[in-house]
């Protein structure tokens, strides 16, 4: 199962739409995970129309219309992998410890907010992934997103992609 990880798209504030490269990844993915800060209900609706399966949460920049449609935290089991999705995890210091305590029954946590790509594993084995942003790089050198493969109840082939 191919999974596309997105966050912090900030449409239309930072871009009019997702980059074509990201839309091609949406078409290839079995599941798209979005960790919040959509900023526009239309961007959620477009992604729902084009994604085979979508899991998403709202972020701190998302208004009442998005909060009415999306949870603060999402939980799913995909290919035997227990996944949690949340927008914000707090300060980078101590993140792994905090997250493993908050999500003890999960294998993977996808989060956003910082726009800083992140891939670490907590002592409990919880994998923490932040795909960055495909539209608003802030202080990062590139716009980014992630892909991964789920098979045999495990996460494989996690890859950070630069938007070109």
Image (tube, rainbow, N blue to C red):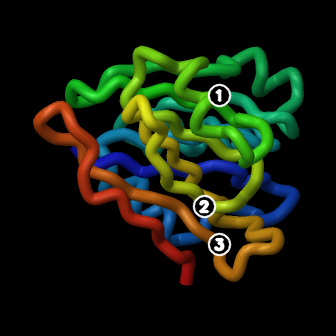
Label 2 CA crowd tier, 10 Å (few <14, some 14–19, many 20+): some
Disc 3 versus disc 2: nearer the observer: 2
Mark linked to residue 74: none
Q: Secondary structure at mark 3?
A: loop
Q: Secondary structure at mark 2?
A: loop
For the point 46% across and 67% down, the residue is 160
Residue corresponding to mark 1? 98
Q: Secondary structure at mark 1?
A: helix
Residue corresponding to mark 2? 117
Q: Nearer the viewer, residue 77 or 101?
A: 101
Q: Give the CA distance from mark 3 to mark 2.
A: 10 Å
Residue 56 to residue 155: above or below: above
Instruction: For residue 38, say whether it is visible.
Output: no
Q: Earlier in the sequence, mark 3 or mark 1?
A: 1
Q: Give the CA distance from mark 3 to mark 1.
A: 27 Å
Residue 68 to residue 88: above or below: above
In percent of width and height, residue 115 lies at: 72, 58
Q: Nearer the viewer, residue 36 or 115?
A: 115
In percent of width and height, residue 130 lies at: 58, 51
For the point 74% across and 70% down, the residue is 137
Image quarter of the C terminus: bottom right
Residue 131 to residue 144: above or below: above
Residue 140 to residue 30: above or below: below
Residue 63: quadrant of the picture:
top right
Residue corresponding to mark 3? 143
In percent of width and height, residue 159 lies at: 38, 64
Label 1 CA crowd tier, 10 Å (few <14, some 14–19, many 20+): some
């Amino acid at each position: 199962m191919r999974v596309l990880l997105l966050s912090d798209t900030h449409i239309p504030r930072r871009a009019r739409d997702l980059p074509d490269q990201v839309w091609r990844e949406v078409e290839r993915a079995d599941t798209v995970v979005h960790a919040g800060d959509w900023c526009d209900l239309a961007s959620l609706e477009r992604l729902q129309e084009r994604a085979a399966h979508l899991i998403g949460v709202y972020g701190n920049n998302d208004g009442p219309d998005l909060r009415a449609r999306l949870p603060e935290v999402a939980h799913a089991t995909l290919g035997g992998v227990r996944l949690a999705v949340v927008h914000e995890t707090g300060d980078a210091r101590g993140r792994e410890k905090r997250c493993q305590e908050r999500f003890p029954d999960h294998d993977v946590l996808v989060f956003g907010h910082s726009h800083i790509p992140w891939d670490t594993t907590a002592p409990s084995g919880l994998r923490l992934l932040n795909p960055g942003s495909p539209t608003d790089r802030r202080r990062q050198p590139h716009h980014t997103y992630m892909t991964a493969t789920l098979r045999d109840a495990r996460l494989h082939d996690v890859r950070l992609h630069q938007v070109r």
